Amino acid sequence: MRILAIDTALGACSACVLDAGELVPVAIEQTAMERGHAEALMPMIERVMGKTEGGFSSLDRVAVTIGPGSYTGLRVGISAARAIALAAGIPAVGISTLAASAAPFIGREGGRVVAAAVDARHGQVWFQALNAHGKQLVSIRQVNHRDAARAIGAGPVSLVGSAALAVANEAWAIGLDALVVDDAKAPDVIWVARLGLIADPESAPPRPLYLKAPETTPQDRARLPRR
């Protein structure tokens, strides 16, 4: 099985093609960026697919990060993945940014909990914790740094993600054995591909995962007094 993986959810724009069972991707490109994903993504995909023998017709699946992450970034990546999957007649699957960030460390941390913490701004983090076998211990949520640390339990914990140090500071304050093992601003797109290869298209649709509702809805805005 061959998969195209796309990530535009956080601080990078990335695409890669990976064959099942292979460690090295067929083609890959990853560029750190906070904005500009909409302009960068499709040319990047074209370059990656240009290095892939058989092009788009050789793909069996598309995977894309669905969040949590930037609203604009998520829409860019998910729209592209859906369009490519539709045109190629193949399934598309959605992978959470937190799972993709934690995945490289599952089973490699000597039985430690692996927790992903991504900066959601204003003192908040997007957070998830998994045990050494990849089983979810703390479901995906948006919390402050202290509540993230307390949700870990007794630990010990290895932390990944852009807010790993902030959560580690709170964990140390309450006496937890915590290590920061990675503070990348975005997941490695190769792991988005690996998780995409084993995902079930029926239970992992390419739909955006939003953890914070908009501050106002259209109905709310309609009720605001006119000035």
Image (cartoon, rainbow, N blue to C red):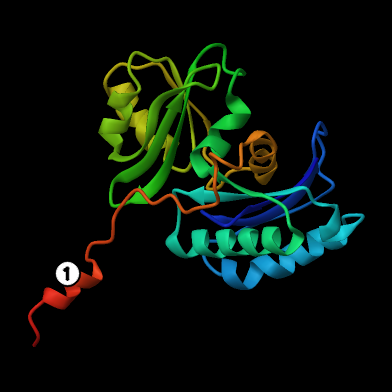
Q: Residue at x 55, y 17 (%)?
A: 133
Residue shown at 45% from the left, 58% from the top? 70
Front residue (pair 92, 193): 92
Quadrant in the rendering for residue 109: top right
Looking at the image, which residue is at 51% across and 63% down? 75
**Picture layout, residue 222 above or below residue 120:** below
Element under disc 1: helix
Q: Is residue 84 left or right of residue 157?
A: right
**Image height of 225 relative to 6, above or below:** below
Q: Position of residue 85 (x, y in %)?
A: 69, 58
Q: Where does the image place residue 83, in percent across and percent down from the top left?
A: 65, 65
Location of the N terminus by quadrant is: top right
Asked whether, in this view, residue 155 is left or right of residue 91, the answer is left
Work out which residue is located at the far right of the displayed protein and give it.
53
Residue 178 x, y percent position in the rendering: 42, 21
Tell me the residue at 62%/60% (across/down): 82
Q: Position of residue 176 (x, y in %)?
A: 35, 17
Quadrant of res 127: top left
The correct choice, above or below, for 163 with respect to 148 in the image is below
Quadrant where the C terminus sits is bottom left
**What residue did someone put label 1 on?**
220
Q: Residues within 10 Å of mark 1 (few under 14, many from 20)?
A: few
| 204 or 103: nearer the viewer | 204
